[in-house]
Image (cartoon, rainbow, N blue to C red):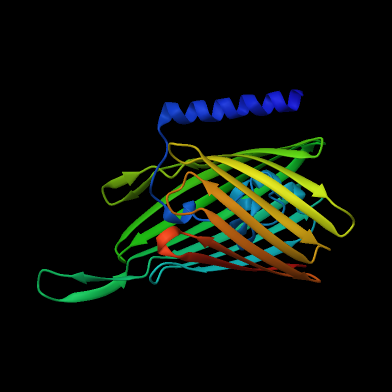
Amino acid sequence: MKHIITSLVLISILFGGLHANDLAGQSAFILRQAMGARPFGMAEVFTAIADDPSAIYYNPAGLANVNERQADLMYWKGIDDQAYLSVSFADNIESIGNIGAGFLYYSGGTIEINFTDGTSEERNAQQDHVFYGAYGKQVLPWLSAGITAKAYFSKLVNEYSASAYAIDIGVLYDVKGINIAHCAQNIGTKLKYYEAEEKLPLVFRNGLSYNYIIDDMNNIIFGCDIIYRNQPLKTHIGAEYNYRNMLSLRTGYKIGYDLDSISLGAGFRKDKFMFDYGIGFMSEIGPTHRVSFGMQF
C-alpha cells in the first residue's frame, strides 16, 4: 500500500509542476514521435512495460528489465518525403546496472527556396539528430529508477542551426505483479533558431501494466498510459499477446486525439533475431507504418 501511495504523490507533484510552468512546447517534432515498432503497435503504451531498448525513449527505469545485450533498428517513411530512423542499444553490466544508448535521425524532405534575384535552390527543409545515453538500475526489490541524457541538433534549410540538451527521469514499481511507472521527459534547455526560441515538448508519462500468464506457452501483457503533452490529458490503452516467446500480436487505442486512434502490430522472433511491425490509422490521412529489426548478442 505504501508503494501505491508514493506513486500517487509523485503523480500529483508531476502534474502540479506542469500546470504551474506551462511547459508544453510544440517544437522538436523528432522528440514527439513513437520509438520502435513494438510500442507503436500498442499505441505507445510502454511506460510501465519498458523491457527492451525502447525503454531509453519511454522510461529509462525499464532498462533494469533488460537481461541481455540487445540492439534495435527502426525505419519510418512519413508523409511526402519525410524519413525517420532510430537506433537503440541496451546492455546489462552486473557490477553497475544497465546502460543504453540511442540515435535518432529525422529528415523533413526538401523545399525549394526562391531568391529575390529570380534564382531558386532546392534545400533540405529540416534535418534533426538526437544522441542518447541512458542508465537504469533496480535499487530495491520493488523499485527501479533510470535517467536518459540527450543532445538534440537541428538544422533548417541548410542554414539555421539550433541545439538543446535535456534529460528524462523515470521510476518503475512492481506492486505484487502490477507495474506502475512514471517518467518526465525532455527536461532541459530551449531550442533556438536565430532569434526564435522555444521550449522542448515536456512530456509526463504515467503507466500501468500487468503480465497475465496463461500457461507455459502463452501470455498477454495489458497496459495503460496517461500522458500529458498539453491539455487535455491523453489516455492510451494497449495489449500484447505472446506465443512461446516467438510470435506476438499487438493492438492499442489512443483516446483524445484528432488523428491517431487505433494501432495494430505483430512481432516474430527466431533465435536471437527479432522483427516487429506496427501500423497506425490516422483518419483521413491514411495509415502510418513502423518496421523494426532487433538482435540479441
Residue 26 x %, y %: 38, 46
User: Can the viewer see residue 108 in this picture?
Assistant: yes
To which quarter of the image does residue 217 belong?
Answer: bottom right
Above or below residue 182? Residue 272 is below
Q: Is residue 80 left or right of residue 72?
A: left
The residue nearer to you, when weighing 159 against 234, is 234
Q: Residue at x 43, y 39 (%)?
A: 230
Above or below residue 78? Residue 2 is above
Above or below residue 199? Residue 118 is below
Total count of labels: 0
To which quarter of the image does residue 178 belong?
Answer: top right
Residue 61 x %, y %: 68, 43
Q: Quadrant of the N terminus?
A: top right
Q: Is residue 168 left or right of residue 193?
A: right
Q: Is residue 156 left or right of residue 90?
A: left
The residue nearer to you, when weighing 111 against 241, is 241
